[in-house]
Structure formats: C-alpha cells, structure tokens
Image (spheres, helix red, strand yellow):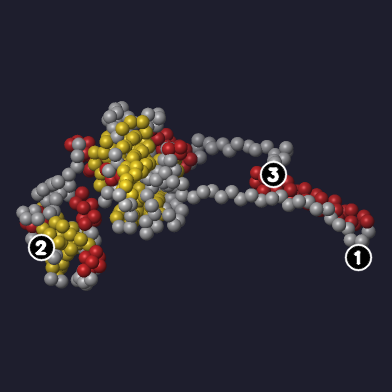
Amino acid sequence: MDENNNGFILINEDKPEAEEEVLQQEQPQNEKPKRKKKGFRGSAFSYIALALICSLLGGFASLFLGPRLFGDSLQASTQYNAQPITIKPNDGDISTISAVAKKAMGSVVGITTVETQMVWPFSAQDVNGLGSGVIIRSDGFILTNSHVIADGNAKELKVLFENGEQVDGTVLWSDAALDLAIVKVNKTNLPVAELGDSDSLEVGELAVAIGNPLGLEFQRTVTSGIISGLNRSVTVDGRVVIENLIQTDASINPGNSGGPLLNGKGQVIGINTAKITSGEGLGFAIPINAVKVIVDQIIETGSYKTVFMGITGVSVEEYQSRLGVKLSADKGIVILEVQNESPAYKAGILSGDILTKIDNIELSDMSQLKKALYDYKQGDKATLTIIRNMKETKLEIEFTEVK
C-alpha cells in the first residue's frame, strides 16, 4: 500500500523500499617524484635511506589499507586467504533463532491476490497483491492480515506452500478494523504453527519474523530482533487506528504482512502488519491473543458473529469539523441514531448522547467501539459512560443480540 500521512505503511506490496547505492573509488595513479635541481640539502646516503623508509611504509599501507579503501576494485593479494565464518551450534541466540525458524518455517505460506480497482474516470484495472500467512489448523485454516486479501474484495486468491504447491484460497472472515483475516484452503495434514501468549510478553524478549519481505523470490526470509515496545497505536491509511500493537526491531518489509512474529519458543505471538517509513527497526505486529477467540469460533462454526448494540454514530472530531460546532467532550462517539428495541435502545441511549467509554475502554470513533465489542459475548453486560446535556452519566447495557 501507499505511505499514509502519518509515515506508516501496511506491508503487503511487492516493492523494495530503497535501492542499494554502490560507491566506487578510483585508485590514485602513482606519480614519479621529481627531484628539485636546486635547494636540496643533505647527503646522498640520507636521501636513499629516506626513500627506502617511504617505500616500506607505502608497502604496508597498500597491504593493510588498500582492501579497506577500495573494496573489490583491487585484486586480493596472493598471500591473503579468506577463512569461512563458522557459527557454532552453542552460540546462544544463534541456535535459538535457527531452532525457531526450523520449527515454524513449514507453517508459513505466501499469499497472492488479484483485485479489480476503479481507475479515474470510468475504467478498471487488475492490481496484484502479495503477502504472507500462517497455518493455524492442519485442515487448511490460515491466519493473515485483512489488507493482504484486499479486505475480502480480491477476485483471485492463491496460497503458496513451502513445497512449492499453489492452491486456491477462500476468505472465511476478515475485519479491516482489526486488520485480520482467516483464509481456508482445501488441504489436510498441513504443518501447524503453535500459538503463544502475547499477554505475557516483556520488552527485550527475542522476536523472530518470517515472511516474504520483497516478493516471492525472497519468500520465507527469517529476521530477528527483540520486542521493542508494547501497546503501541498506529494510524494507517490516514484514518484507521490499529491499537495494542507489538513493536519490534526485527526487519519487516513489504510482503511480510500476515506472516508470524515468533518468540524464543517458536510460538506465534503476533501477526506482522505495519512498519514506519521514517526510521529503521520500527515494525509492528497484532498480538495473537486478540484473535484467539475469533479463530476458535470460526473453526467451530465456520463464521464469527459479534454482539450488537444498535447505534449509528460519528466521532466527536468529525462531527465538530463537519458542522463547525464545539461539543462538551474532546473525544467520543456522537450518537446519531438508535434502533428501536435494540440493546442500546433498552439501555436508554438517546440520539445526541456522546458515548465516551464502554466499561474501562475509552472510545473515540466507531472503529474502536467495533473492536471493543469483540471482547463481549451474547448475554454479557457492560457499563456505558455517556455525556448528556453536558453531564456524565452511566448506563448498563446487556448484549442480547449478535450479528
């Protein structure tokens, strides 16, 4: 995808971020020293001694500095023998990273899509997309990003396995607000990734990313780093805010989207989703615990349904900018409509109320509310904080419906 106004990109495009610049230097040409005809003082012996010393120093400089200054522009001396670098199996994190890669590699897949997009003014063109995914069940369930599968709008979707086999995939579920999707393929006995616990992560832990960073020619590339931060928020496409993200300095590039972020045990702790373009080592992943309940329900029933409130609303910021008015709340959701006999109607919510919290979760727009509702099941109750007539009020809602 294109870079947004906040300097973040979703990472499913097959585009290298920068071209490597190769600098070449020319070897200076040797010039013969010219003896001055006049003004020379000293004996011939001292001059010869000085010339010998300079010659020796020049030889040493050529031997030690030449390769550093000119790289491949100079041929290696016949006395120089390159020794291969050997990584021993007991080299601490090196062996851990190798073990993690070996454990998880077979469960990582490539995903390619074809999406028809409208081009101004009245024409359409097919656009190819590329990303990654991870197998979460042996009978063909694959977890990836919603933007990798064009938010469910791809007209063609292919899944590429480690053995080179390529099959058609079907989108079972996707949510652009969460940037998550589940794809199904008609395969059995597939290698499955082990899911970890993203709630137990600590800053500084080992993090390993596997995916297709710059295209299928670099598929299943392994990079490593650490967990750099937790509970990060990133704005993508200039409007969609993805919250509670894991920050890592493991190298993540276009095409890594949907691939797994793994801990030192080879367990999936996140799904790689975005990176910042204004700096290096700033990648982000969606915590795996955010999707576990969804995955379980989809595997069990074939679909996922969320609880239903029955409201239509808009953010305070958007409401103020459109109407040019000042509200009593700095952020929240302005309720525009309440459906009759809905859970919100029965809770006493009215048009014009400003919804600021659901339990202890602060809300700023409908996207955040939608994500918050994933934590509730049919029959659950919650406390809503609203502002009505410039006063804060609390209401209780019971989620009696799903959709």
Where is mark 2, residue-wise?
Answer: 350
- Among the two numbered marks 2 and 1 on one chain, the one whose residue lies closer to the N terminus: 1
Q: Please give left or right for residue 364 compared with residue 389 in the image.
A: right
Left or right for 32, reference 7: right
Residue 40 position within the rendered picture, expressed as x and y whole percent measured from the top left: 91, 63
Residue placed under numbered mark 3 in the picture: 74
- Name the quadrant containing residue 325: bottom left
- Measured from the top left, where is residue 395 in percent x and y? 11, 61
Disc 2 to disc 1, C-alpha distance: 103 Å
Count of numbered circles on the image? 3
Q: Nearer the viewer, residue 130 or 139?
A: 130
- Cα separation between marks 3 and 2: 79 Å
Can residue 285 be seen from the camera position used here? no
Q: Which mark is residue 39?
A: 1
Q: Nearer the viewer, residue 41 or 94?
A: 41
- Marks 3 and 1 sit apart, C-alpha to C-alpha, by 38 Å
Please give the name of the residue rendered at 37% of the width and 33% of the height, measured from the top-left corner. Answer: 160
* Above or below 147: residue 142: above
